[in-house]
Image (spheres, rainbow, N blue to C red):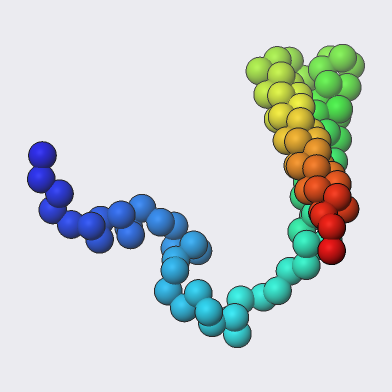
């Protein structure tokens, strides 16, 4: 088994994650962690609202698309579980930092 080009790995990296000009911060907009977290929580909330609306529509007989209702519910559930895991990791990191001795 021969390895032809190591450069082939470079094409697997998405364009927005390119390592070219990694130290060039002039072109990249800075988003604070708080803003990023707020937008992520808003997306999770939107997914939950969408699932709730679809469940209500199904209960009222406005829709009969059961797979769409179930998929929306699972998306909201997975997003919430992921958010809770991120929160747990942040709290673990915070408590670890607080335990550090200066």
Q: Quadrant of residue 45 in the image?
A: top right
Which residue is at 33% across, 59% downward? Answer: 10
State left or right for residue 48 relative to residue 3: right
Front in this rendered view, residue 71 or 89: 89
Q: Residue furthest bottom?
A: 26
Front in this rendered view, residue 39 or 64: 39
Could one spot residue 98 in this view of the protein?
yes
Q: Position of residue 2 (x, y in %)?
A: 10, 45
Could one spot residue 68 in this view of the protein?
no
Quadrant holding the N terminus = top left
Q: Residue furthest front?
A: 101
Q: Quadrant of residue 72 in the image?
A: top right
Q: Position of residue 87 (x, y in %)?
A: 81, 42
Q: Position of residue 39 (x, y in %)?
A: 79, 55
State whether residue 9 is above or below residue 63: below
Which residue is at 87% across, 14% downward? Answer: 59
Front in this rendered view, residue 68 or 101: 101
Q: Position of residue 40 (x, y in %)?
A: 77, 50
Front in this rendered view, residue 24 or 27: 24
State whether residue 50 is above or below residue 98: above
State left or right for residue 91 relative to residue 71: right
State left or right for residue 50 relative to residue 17: right
Quadrant holding the C terminus = bottom right
Figure label count:
0
Which residue is at 13% across, 53% downward? Answer: 4
Which residue is at 76% across, 36% downward? Answer: 85
């Amino acid at each position: 088994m021969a390895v032809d080009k190591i450069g082939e790995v470079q094409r697997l990296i998405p364009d927005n994650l390119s390592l070219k000009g990694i130290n060039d911060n002039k072109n990249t907009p800075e988003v604070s962690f708080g803003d990023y977290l707020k937008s992520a929580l808003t997306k999770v909330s939107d997914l939950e609202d969408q699932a709730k609306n679809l469940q209500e529509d199904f209960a009222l007989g406005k829709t009969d698309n059961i797979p769409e209702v179930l998929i929306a519910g699972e998306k909201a559930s997975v997003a919430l579980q992921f958010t809770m895991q991120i929160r747990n990791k942040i709290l673990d990191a915070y408590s670890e930092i607080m335990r550090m001795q200066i």
